Image: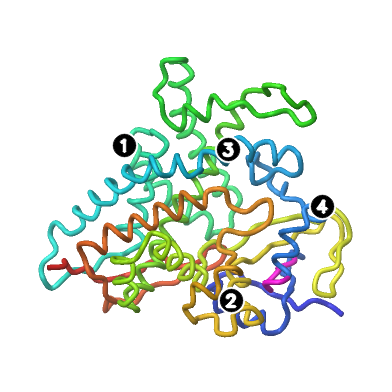
Amino acid sequence: MSAPTFDPTHLEPRSATDEQRAEAPLARTPDGTWVVLGHEEAVAVAGDHESFSSAVSRFLQVPNGLDGAEHAAFRQVLDPFFGPEPMAQLEPVVRRVAAELVEELLADVGAAGTEIDAVAALGAVFAVRAQTAWLGWPAQLERELLQWMVDNHEASRSGELARTAEVAERFDAIIRSVVAPRRALGDHAPADVTTALMRVRVPLPGLPGDPGRELRDEEIVSVLRNWTGGDLGSIALCIGVLLTGIARAPQLAERLRVGTDEEAAAIIDELLRIDDPFVANRRVATCPVTVAGHEIGAGERVQIHWTSANRDERVFPDPEAFDPAAHAEHNLVYGTGRHVCPGRPLATLELRVALQELLAVADVAPAPTPGEREIAPVGGWAHAPVVLTPRG
């Protein structure tokens, strides 16, 4: 039995995979990549760390592109950056960033409200300001980072390796411009997250009690690229999805205003499950393995399609139904398994605070201008128009 062919090129990920998944939970692209569309199959592949390797890129990717003991060693020292105490200390900083941006957006808004693009006007700017504040990067980088986000988005949609390589190198140069002065300052470098990362020591597997080794410069650049390069665009897309959903369901805005932080996080997770902008992760098979009745050969490429898995009718009978409590256990927005996204606490914090600060002073309604959906390999909204109206 051959797997059905699926070509997601230039298609919107939700509608395309909803149709394809009805045929089978596993498909194959014209270039031979296996696409895991079903929820059960996605969990199985993500959890089988022996049969599926995450070392899929020609670029160094720390920690998400590592496997086994090496991956575990880096997660051991990097995950604490997203622990409860660091996030609690960061919250007032992120809240101030959000409040100032919302004030700017509403400065010239009349009683009748005004239309904004939730992705570009709010999401992208907030993502840059929140991430640079967290990392201790100069505020003067904002314009350069915003332009980089535009260029990176266009390069990703083009699928041209030369363009994606060029924008990746530009981002690495930005990172090096931040790291180099700290190297020169040594013990006098500013006490921030970037400096703390540069002083991390990675434990050496098999040598308990050993102090480990310092990160190499290319590893520091890779971690910071992972923490920022991908997250900037992701946070912007998430805010587009969230505000579009809230505009269509104003009762959610009130729940976000008066509910607990835990309820806010649950609402955010469920809106992102319904319209998951974190489309896919890649793997490569290390040995022959059977998935959904098909044998995947050693060395063959595999794509776990989270957007599709989060809408699998076998788990979510009505994928569009909003039910945070019922769906939380099966929500795969941040992945699953050992490579589950370590930055989930940071993303949840930033998204929750951004919504709370905006909704405290503004109502959000659908805009007369139609939105524009993203196309593979990106999900969510390319442009998400909403109308902001000052409250009170």
In front: label 1 or label 2 = 2
State the residue at coordinates (75%, 27%).
208
State the residue at coordinates (71%, 84%).
23
State which tag comes first along the sequence, 1 or 2: 1
Amino acid type at circle 2 is: Arg
Element under label 4?
A: loop
Amino acid type at circle 3 is: Leu
Residue 148: x and y in percent read 42, 46
State which tag comes first along the sequence, 4 or 2: 4
In front: label 1 or label 3 = 3
Residue stretch rendered in magenta on the structure: 34-40
Which picture quadrant has residue 26? bottom right
Where does label 1 land, which residue? Answer: 139
Where does label 2 land, which residue? Answer: 311
Residue 72: x and y in percent read 70, 41
Q: Is residue 235 magenta?
A: no
State the residue at coordinates (67%, 79%).
21
Where does label 4 land, which residue? Answer: 50
Query: Dot 4, how many residues are within 10 Å of its Cα: few (below 14), some (14-19), or many (20+)?
Result: few
State which tag comes first along the sequence, 1 or 3: 3
Q: Residue furthest right?
A: 288
Alpha carbon separation for disc pair 4 and 3 = 23 Å
